[in-house]
Amino acid sequence: MTEALQLDNEKDVLKAYYAGQRIESPMGGYLMLLGVRALEGGTALGIFECSASSLRYEIEIPKATRTERRKVRDVLDAGDDPDCPRHGSGYRLVRAGKDLVCAACGVAYARA
Ligand SMILES: [Zn+2]
């Protein structure tokens, strides 16, 4: 397997990804999500494959901000099940070990 490449428009890619939009690949075609991997410290790595070239790209998905954590904590305190603050409704956070994690972005937003 070849080394994964980096994208130079990561911010735009992440925005489209959170919004559930198709992500255009720099090689033509689209970037398809192969998976997310949780990294140390709450950050995650998104692995994408270009539908046209089959090249692989890795994008670091930033860890939860203080604001995002507070938003999730408020929902928990109200006795509700929080959704991912980035992906929005329909993306319920799931328990993973000690954390509440979004399965789509791999980011931990709260302690379970
Ligand atoms: Zn998410």
Image (cartoon, rainbow, N blue to C red):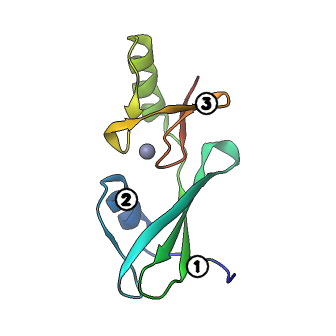
Q: Secondary structure beneath disc 3?
A: strand
Q: Position of residue 36 (x, y in %)?
A: 56, 55
Q: Position of residue 100 (x, y in %)?
A: 55, 30
Does residue 52 appear to the left or right of 55 in the view shown? left
Q: Which residue is mark 1?
A: 5
Using the image, determine if residue 20 lies above or below residue 23: above
Circles 3 and 2 in contact, beta carbons < 8 Å: no
Q: Secondary structure beneath disc 1?
A: loop
Does residue 26 appear to the left or right of 97 in the view shown? left
Q: Secondary structure beneath disc 2?
A: helix
Circles 2 and 1 in contact, beta carbons < 8 Å: no
The Cα–Cα distance between marks 2 and 1, rounded to whole angstroms, is: 17 Å
15 or 46, nearer to the observer: 46
Residue at 31 percent across and 56 percent down: it is 20
The Cα–Cα distance between marks 1 and 3, rounded to whole angstroms, is: 29 Å
Which residue reaches farthest top? 78
User: If you read the primary sequence from the N terminus, does the residue marked by circle 1 or circle 3 appear first?
Assistant: 1
Looking at the rendered structure, the kind of residue marked 1 is: Leu
Looking at the rendered structure, the kind of residue marked 2 is: Tyr
Q: Which residue is mark 2?
A: 17
